[in-house]
């Protein structure tokens, strides 16, 4: 299992410099039957729940996450003819098979904020293997802005499918229609059209208190528009980066994005709808999906244990909406974007058959040997990788600018860079160019209205740059092969994983 953002960014560094307090966490990966929206299905889960259990860490900890793969293996792992291995495995590691345990050692250093973990295989990720990971900061410079920040203030928002990804992928390959989810879940509960009246998840507040709500869009595909009836939200964190307080009443979140917001319980005691409205795909393609039904309940202490009496809406619109605009987000600690040394232009496109996405006409295919192992074996230039690995070898300590030109035919893809924050110089949806105090984040929308970002190659290693579910839409930034070889002394564990994986019977690979 790969830990998004937090984990991977420190993964390589920590192999050499584990330090601070060790925080040991165990996750058992098991199959269970759950019915988060009232429809019972088998899911791949961390510890048998959805979302998976909170991984709680403190700034400066070294997190040691032991993942025990206890999956039964009836088709769950690695059908060789499926393309779901396009996800993150094979960049830094081999996937691991049944009965294998692996301990990730993650020095967190000064990183803080809201993250999540999910399976390294996109298939299991959509099938339920996702959960929150929060790194608390005992010396949070924004601590005076809120009173409560604990397990009860995590809002985990995700799309949900009744079918497992195996038939969905087969159907996608046959029809070229990207599956549309059956429901949207708020903290693991939701409803679908004509389904049972599942209890919505309740978020409890007390009049007068201020809550640091940690919104996590843990979608596989869908984005969400989040609002709370009669309340505003003050954004103070963006993908783990402390943000100058910014008050809005509607937040659009792409898959993978996180916002920490302060919610003040300043309305009359009662029950209020939390609207978490899913977007993504044509609802006409899945009659189970009713986006209006994706929601939770904000309940004041003293209110009845009942649903709000207000009608279910999609949230503020028109003149009543104060939407979050990415280009208006400012980091609490401004770091100007340095001038760039190199520029990459990424034109995203889709094949006429609409099954494969391309970056500059190349569709990413997972290599047989993980990129990191190739680098440890001496790969040093673009030419050492197959074209379909879309791997860019970059020098260390440079500033790289990546430009996604605007394209009327394209849709917006949430791009995520492992291991690094980038400066968002120009957001989709605005012409504003900001090199002075741009927001830094690790997931950005790109590909429709034009997006420009910069990142520093101050960390050697192969970093995956990708969009989760779009087959082919990925590349690898292989930063400093020589420096990578110098800092990563193979512990033997990676090789063991690959040996174990290669030793699996073919039908399990
Ligand atoms: C997951 O379950 C295992 C076994 O019950 C337990 O030891 C572990 O603490 C749980 N992990 C978390 C993060 O709660
Ligand atoms: C995993 O362990 C279980 C219980 O020990 C065993 O029954 C099963 O055969 C093992 N699976 C593999 C693939 O080794
Ligand atoms: C975190 O630590 C690194 C290395 O010590 C330093 O370069 C960076 O500025 C620090 N970041 C913050 C937000 O303090
Ligand atoms: C799952 O997908 C298969 C293949 O498209 C379909 O036959 C089946 O009805 C689907 N099951 C559910 C529960 O949607
Ligand atoms: C994969 O191969 C198996 C048989 O080897 C076949 O039954 C199955 O339909 C194939 N799946 C896909 C998605 O092509
Ligand atoms: C989550 O991401 C999906 C896919 O990008 C997006 O459609 C949805 O609006 C996002 N949800 C939230 C709450 O941001
Ligand atoms: C919430 O806002 C709506 C629309 O502005 C208003 O009609 C309603 O009275 C408010 N509810 C409460 C409890 O204040
Ligand atoms: C979706 O749910 C809302 C709220 O229950 C309901 O009013 C609406 O009719 C539903 N839409 C469809 C297409 O059933
Ligand atoms: C992609 O291929 C098409 C057709 O060969 C060509 O016109 C276009 O310039 C190429 N785009 C890029 C970014 O290389
Ligand atoms: C290498 O790239 C070619 C296209 O350039 C592709 O046809 C082939 O499948 C790739 N091989 C591997 C092992 O990825
Ligand atoms: C992205 O930009 C395009 C073109 O300006 C615009 O139509 C679209 O609404 C924008 N998307 C978001 C989520 O801002």
Image (spheres, rainbow, N blue to C red):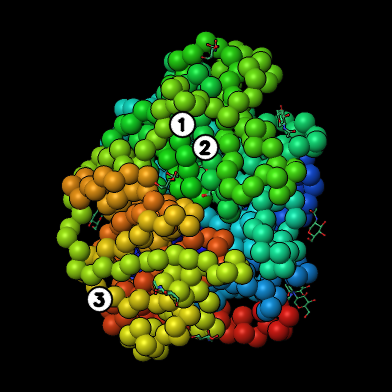
- Above or below residue 283? Residue 246 is above
Quarter of the image for the N terminus: give it.
bottom right
Give the residue drawn at x 56%, y 61%. 469
Relative horizontal placement of residue 177, taking residue 204 as reference (left or right): right
Position of 124 relative to 301 (above/below): below
Mark 1 or mark 3, which has the lower sequence index? 1
**Mark count:** 3
Q: Find residue 149 and report its horizontal and vertical position in percent.
A: 45, 33
- Residue 57 is marked as none
Report the disc number at residue 395: 3
Which residue carries the number 2 mark? 225
Q: Residue at x 41, y 27 (%)?
A: 322
Q: Is mark 2 in CB contact (under 8 Å) with mark 1?
A: yes
Discs 3/2, front: 2
**Secondary structure type for disc 3:** loop
- Tell whether 147 sits left or right of 394: right
Where residue 129 appears, as percent x and y from the top left, is 62, 56
Q: Looking at the image, which is closer to me, 266 or 323?
A: 323
Q: Is residue 160 visible?
A: no
Asked if ligand 6 lies within 8 A of label 2, the reply is yes
Q: Is mark 1 within 8 Å of ligand 6?
A: no
Question: Which label sits in the foreground, 1 or 3?
Answer: 1
| Mark 3 neighbour density, 10 Å: few (under 14) some (14–19) many (20 or more) | some
Q: Position of residue 10 (x, y in %)?
A: 37, 62
Instruction: Mark yes or no: residue 453 visible.
Output: yes
Instruction: Check disc 1 and report the residue beneath it.
Output: 250
């Amino acid at each position: 299992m790969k830990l998004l953002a937090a984990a991977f960014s420190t993964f390589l560094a920590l192999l050499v410099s584990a330090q601070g307090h060790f925080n040991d966490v165990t996750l058992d990966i098991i199959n269970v039957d759950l019915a988060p929206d009232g429809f019972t299905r088998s899911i791949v889960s961390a510890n048998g729940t959805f979302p998976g259990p909170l991984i709680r860490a403190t700034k400066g900890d070294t997190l040691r996450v032991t993942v025990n793969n206890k999956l039964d293996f009836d088709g769950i792992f690695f059908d060789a003819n499926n393309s779901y291995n396009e996800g993150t495995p094979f960049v830094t590691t081999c996937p691991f098979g049944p009965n294998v345990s692996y301990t990730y050692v993650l020095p967190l250093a000064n990183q803080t904020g809201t993250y999540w973990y999910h399976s390294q295989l996109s298939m299991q990720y959509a099938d339920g293997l996702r959960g929150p990971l929060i790194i608390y900061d005992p010396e949070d410079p924004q601590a005076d802005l809120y009173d409560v920040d604990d397990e009860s203030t995590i809002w985990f928002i995700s799309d949900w499918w009744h079918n497992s990804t195996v038939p969905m992928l087969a159907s996608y390959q046959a029809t070229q229609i990207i599956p549309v989810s059956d429901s949207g879940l708020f903290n693991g509960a939701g409803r679908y059209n004509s389904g049972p009246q599942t209890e919505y998840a309740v978020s409890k507040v007390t009049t007068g208190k201020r809550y640091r709500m940690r919104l996590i869009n843990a979608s596989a595909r869908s984005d969400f528009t989040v609002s709370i009836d009669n309340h505003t939200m003050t954004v103070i964190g963006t993908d783990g980066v402390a943000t100058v307080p910014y008050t809005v009443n509607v937040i659009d979140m792409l898959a993978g994005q996180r916002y920490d917001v302060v919610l003040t319980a300043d309305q009359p005691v009662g029950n209020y709808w939390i609207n978490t409205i899913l977007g993504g795909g044509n609802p006409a393609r899945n009659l189970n999906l009713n986006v209006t039904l994706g929601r939770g309940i904000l309940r004041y202490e003293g209110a009845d244990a009942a649903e709000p009496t207000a009608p279910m809406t999609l949230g503020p619109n028109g003149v009543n909406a104060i939407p979050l605009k990415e280009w208006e987000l400012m980091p609490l600690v401004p770091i100007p974007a340095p001038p760039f040394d190199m520029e990459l232009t990424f034109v995203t496109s889709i094949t006429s058959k609409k099954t494969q996405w391309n970056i500059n006409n190349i569709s990413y295919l997972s290599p047989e040997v993980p990129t990191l192992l190739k680098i440890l074996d001496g790969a040093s230039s673009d030419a050492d990788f197959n074209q379909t690995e879309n791997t860019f070898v970059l020098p260390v300590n440079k500033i790289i600018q990546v430009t996604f030109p605007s394209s009327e035919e394209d849709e917006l893809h949430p791009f995520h860079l492992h291991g690094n924050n980038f400066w968002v110089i120009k957001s989709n949806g605005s012409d504003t160019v900001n090199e002075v105090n741009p927001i830094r984040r690790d997931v950005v929308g790109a590909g429709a209205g034009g997006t420009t970002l910069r990142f520093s190659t101050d960390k050697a290693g192969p970093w995956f740059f990708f969009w989760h579910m779009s087959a082919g839409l990925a590349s690898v930034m292989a930063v400093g092969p020589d420096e990578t070889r110098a800092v990563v002394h193979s512990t033997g564990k990676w090789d063991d994983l690959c040996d174990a994986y290669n030793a699996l019977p073919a039908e399990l690979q």
